[in-house]
Image (cartoon, rainbow, N blue to C red):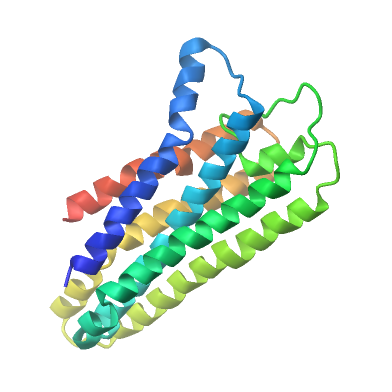
């Protein structure tokens, strides 16, 4: 019964390791060498991999929410619904859509021209910060960013919220308190990780929208780019 979730956890762990590996090594090198320079190719590559693994985290959390929904709301049909074929297909779709989204956004940036002596007020090449230092028209790129965030990010979040709304309804229908606790405990770890991921992400973007302090924005970004992926295995490890 635990096999589908463990398969999803393996993919989430791999995504988290790669997610932090796109920013932390370069940040540590910058601190050690006291140099904040990065090449054009290195910036585009870092931005692409960051978008890819951030999107993959997003989709995997949505798939894991669906897994918990089936386990709690349809426990007798769990092994039939969450069979290895469907589980593998959902993971494959998550990797593919994340890769296509990252590639498309990077191609949109490559067609634009940068201003001379550019400086990004961040500790990594964030898509939002990179677009702000482009000299040419960024209308299509901005629309692509908003479309991606709204459809892909918002769609995954909507799926998670819908799954948990059904889970809460099913748990409330359980008559015994012990049964309610047991059902809720099966999704407590995933709910904690989802809260960390989306809470820090939304907090970072809300803080960046409300302030123009680049240092504060960079500090807030550390929460979801470094701290959250490091806490994910701790949360699931303690639960296991």
- The C terminus: image quadrant: bottom left
- Check the image and report above or below for 161 versus 35: below
- Check the image and report above or below for 52 versus 37: below
Q: Quadrant of residue 180?
A: bottom left
On the image, the x and y values in percent for residue 81 come to 29, 82
User: Which residue is nearer to you in this view: 123 or 188?
Assistant: 123
- Count every numbered label the image shows and give the total: 0
User: Residue drawn at (57%, 44%), measured in percent from left and top?
Assistant: 48
Q: Quadrant of residue 215?
A: top right
On the image, the x and y values in percent for residue 167 come to 33, 78
User: Which residue is nearer to you in this view: 220 or 17?
Assistant: 17
Q: Is residue 222 visible?
A: yes
In-image side of 195 versus 232 (left or right): right
Q: Is residue 186 visible?
A: no
In-image side of 143 versus 148 (left or right): right
Q: Quadrant of residue 189?
A: bottom left
On the image, the x and y values in percent for residue 67 come to 31, 72
- The N terminus: image quadrant: bottom left
User: Which residue is nearer to you in this view: 62 or 224?
Assistant: 62
On the image, the x and y values in percent for residue 203 come to 54, 49
User: Residue drawn at (62%, 37%), measured in percent from left and top?
Assistant: 44
User: Residue drawn at (45%, 66%), measured in percent from left and top?
Assistant: 93
- Check the image and report above or below for 81 versus 100: below
- Check the image and report above or below for 236 versus 162: above
């Amino acid at each position: 019964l635990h096999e589908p979730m463990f398969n999803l956890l393996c993919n989430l762990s791999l995504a988290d390791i790669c997610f932090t590996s796109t920013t932390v090594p370069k940040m540590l090198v910058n601190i050690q060498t006291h140099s904040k320079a990065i090449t054009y190719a290195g910036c585009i590559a870092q931005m692409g991999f960051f978008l890819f693994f951030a999107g993959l985290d997003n989709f995997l959390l949505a798939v894991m929410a669906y897994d918990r929904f089936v386990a709690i709301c349809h426990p007798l049909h769990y092994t039939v619904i969450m069979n290895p074929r469907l589980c593998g297909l959902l993971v494959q779709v998550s990797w593919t859509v994340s890769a296509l989204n990252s590639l498309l956004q990077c191609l949109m940036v490559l067609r634009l021209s940068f201003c001379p002596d550019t400086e990004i007020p961040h500790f990594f090449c964030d898509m939002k910060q990179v677009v702000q230092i482009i000299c040419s028209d960024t209308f299509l790129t901005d629309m692509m960013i908003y479309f991606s965030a709204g459809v892909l990010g918002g769609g995954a979040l909507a799926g998670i919220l819908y799954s948990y709304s059904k889970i809460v309804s099913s748990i409330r229908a359980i008559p015994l308190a012990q049964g309610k606790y047991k059902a809720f405990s099966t999704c407590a770890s995933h709910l904690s990780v989802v809260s960390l991921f989306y809470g820090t992400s939304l907090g970072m973007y809300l803080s960046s929208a409300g302030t123009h302090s680049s240092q504060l924005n960079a500090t807030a970004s550390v929460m979801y780019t470094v701290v959250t992926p490091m806490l994910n295995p701790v949360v699931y490890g303690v639960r296991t």
